[in-house]
Amino acid sequence: MESEIKEVKSTETLATAIYEEGWCLIEDVVPEDRIEPIKTELTTMGQGETENKPFTRVTNGITNYCASSINYSQSFAEYLAHPRVVDLVGKLFGPHFRVCATSTTNNIPGGSRKEWHGDQPFAGNYAGHIESPYPDVNIMTLTTIWMFSSFSEDNGGTHIRPRSHKLDTNPSYGAKPSFDPYPDEIQVTGPAGSVLLFDSRLWHAGGANKTDEPRISLVARYAPWWMNQNIYIPESIEQKIVNDDHKQRVISYPSMPLEVYEKLPEVAKPLFRHSVRV
């Protein structure tokens, strides 16, 4: 029986998809034999760690969110520097870029559909966002969702609105969260080991998990060298300055301890050297 040969899209093709549609999917980034070990770590990450308690959420024994996941496991770090990914990021941002945030986003069984939003700096209900209507600018941050479970319609694959990154706002700037479906939305599905990449302005929302298994994923956001990330450091001066509206949520990503940085694969160190705490 002949094996299926999957098309490998060029960096130029993927970049064009980001520019025009706002998103793309790259399959077979994480090797099959590494998916389950990393998946297991992501389901328990941050639990019992006192210093990270404010930045970790656990439901029914499953970590559904953990900020600065890289501080608790470096098992996925080498894949953040995968050639197909960094070639695309370099095409979008130029040679000097970094990973500005990592977090687990595990969709627990029975989890409901999440609200529409854009990611920072285009999350209107978080402190430190760009005001809407925001200007027509080049891509400022790239969100990546790493699938350690296969994404399906049943387990809550991410909903997106293609081309919405070309609009000058998103529902997170509204007075109330928006959960309404749109006629042009699609739900992204893909096999475990794949990466969904999109312009952080793109409207997106986590789907409802109708299965009895958690949908495990990791979010990593890439940014160019000039993007200020200090507002995400807990108790930083920048975070205190922008957090002047107590109705808005604050995003915090604890810095990376030096001993964690030293454990990183060499290919991943350039992506995180800006966040090291000494």
Image (tube, rainbow, N blue to C red):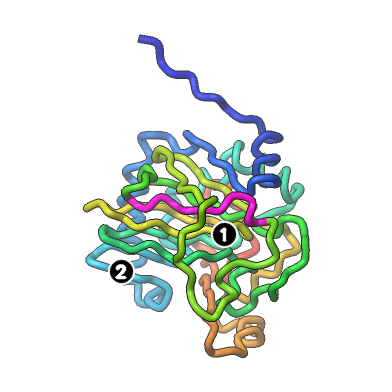
User: Does the image show residue 244?
Assistant: yes
Q: Crowding near pointer 2: few (<14 within 10 Å), some, many (20+)?
A: some
Q: Is residue 248 magenta?
A: no
Residue drawn at x 50%, y 64% as measured from the top left = 116
Element at label 2: strand
Q: Which residue is mark 2?
A: 58
Q: Is residue 102 left or right of residue 72?
A: right
Q: Is residue 219 left or right of residue 48?
A: right
Residue 267's place in the image compared with 31, above or below, is below
Mostly what secondary structure, the magenta segment? Answer: loop
Q: Is residue 103 left or right of residue 16?
A: left
Indicate the quadrant where residue 218 lies.
Answer: bottom left
Element at label 1: loop
Indicate the quadrant where residue 16 lies.
Answer: top right
Quadrant occupied by the C terminus: bottom right
**Among the two numbered marks 1 and 2 on one chain, the one whose residue lies closer to the N terminus:** 2
Quadrant occupied by the N terminus: top left
Residue drawn at x 51%, y 72% as measured from the top left = 254
Residue 195, percent across and down? 50, 44
Q: Give the amino acid type for the residue marked by disc 1 in the picture.
A: Trp
* Residue range of the region highlighted in magenta in the rendering: 155-165
Indicate the quadrant where residue 121 lies.
Answer: bottom right
- Residue 115 bears which disc, if any? none
Residue 239's place in the image compared with 226, above or below, is below
- Residue 203 bears which disc, if any? 1
